[in-house]
Amino acid sequence: MRVHSLQSLPFIVGTNPSIAKTLETYRDSFQLLATYPPVKTLEDNQRFTQQLEALVERHANDVPTMAKGFLESAKYILALLNALSAIQNRISVRLIAEQHIAISRALEEARTGYVGVVDTQLKVERMIRMCESYVAELCAATLGASPVVEIDGEVDAAFAYIPVHLEYMLTEILKNSFRATVEHHHKKSHQTPLPPVRITLVTAGDTGSFFSIRIRDEGGGVSPSNMARIFSYAFTTAKSDDDPDAGGGPYAAQHVGGLANIGGDNSHLFAEITSKGLQTGLGSIAGLGYGLPMSKLYAKYFGGSLELVSLEGWGADLFLKLRCLSDEAGSSVI
């Protein structure tokens, strides 16, 4: 379906090098999976899982590649972009692949507290602090300063969710809040301390079936003329760079499956991603306009939501509501 979606793009868009590269990768992967022999034994599954892992890694940068191509082709595709199902399909396909890999790994070595890629006791405060550390370094290196994050509400709460999805959403939301806070207050004065970004955690619903996160900043809010487009693909309030290859936008340093990837020690990966992000400058903290709409897609994937309320001239509240992926909450992973 994704191959067909990309093939159906206007000719001038399909010839864009980044989009053409993505299409070629999809074609090759589809051909491999479509012709793969049936898996009948555990040994067959082990070989298939190894192949699947290679494909997941190969497609890790699909979204930054597509984002670059869509941005370069924006005037030809913007009217069609929101109708494309390619990005949502990518979430499904990648999730199914990673779930299969994680369950297959668990046959050899079980991970306590996990069902496939789902962390049944995901500590939200810990995830926020990890994302804050990454975004703060990025923001300080790019803009010269960074606000701190204050967390209140149910700070010790945990719920069942997919770490890489939550990591992605929090990172993109914090990028927006941090950049807005620094730019808005540096217009007034470089001497006054930056106000914090305040995050409130709450378990929602009578059965705890949802978990809600409010991110509040004092970054000046969003103008009414931009509010209608704030969740539109390729829309960004960041100023573009003269060099089209500079930076790389929100995805320059992060793909979904980054800091909280499945299995293994993440510390070396965190350092690698941070260093790559710092090398790319402003392009890493903002630019391609995929952060918020992609975050909304991830939130809605399991029946959650992402909403933004702006107070122009002061700041914005962003409400992230996520469905708990536990048996008690009546949810299923796939």
Image (tube, helix red, strand yellow):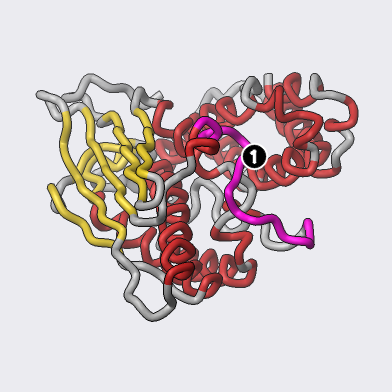
Residue picked out by circle 1: 234
Assess whether residue 33 is covered by the magenta stretch.
Answer: no
Residue 290 point in image, percent of width and height: 58, 42
Among the 4 quarters of the image, the one containing residue 209 = top left
Tell me the residue at 55%/33% (across/down).
Answer: 229
Q: Specify the quadrant that holds the N terminus.
A: top right
Other-residue count near label 1 (Cα within 10 Å), few / some / many at <14 / 14–19 / ≥20: many
Locate residue 71, reporting x and y percent.
73, 42
Along the viewing direction, whichever of 227 and 252 lies nearer the viewer: 227
- Which secondary structure dominates the residues rendered in magenta? loop
Q: Can residue 237 be found in the magenta stretch?
A: yes
Q: The C terminus lies in which quarter of the figure?
A: top left
Residue 211 seen by the camera: yes
- At x 34%, y 56%, the residue is 218
- The residue drawn where x is 54% and y is 38% is 226
Percent across and percent down for residue 182 are 44, 66
Which residue shows up at 78% across the image and 56% down it? 244
Name the amino acid type tagged 1: Ala
Q: Which residues are magenta?
A: 228-244
Camera-side residue of 176 and 309: 309
Q: Quadrant of residue 304?
A: top left
> Tag count in the figure?
1
On the question of residue 42 being in view, the answer is no
In the displayed structure image, the side of residue 307 where residue 328 appears, left or right: left
Q: At which x and y percent is residue 222?
A: 46, 44
Decide if residue 309 is on the left or right side of residue 175.
left
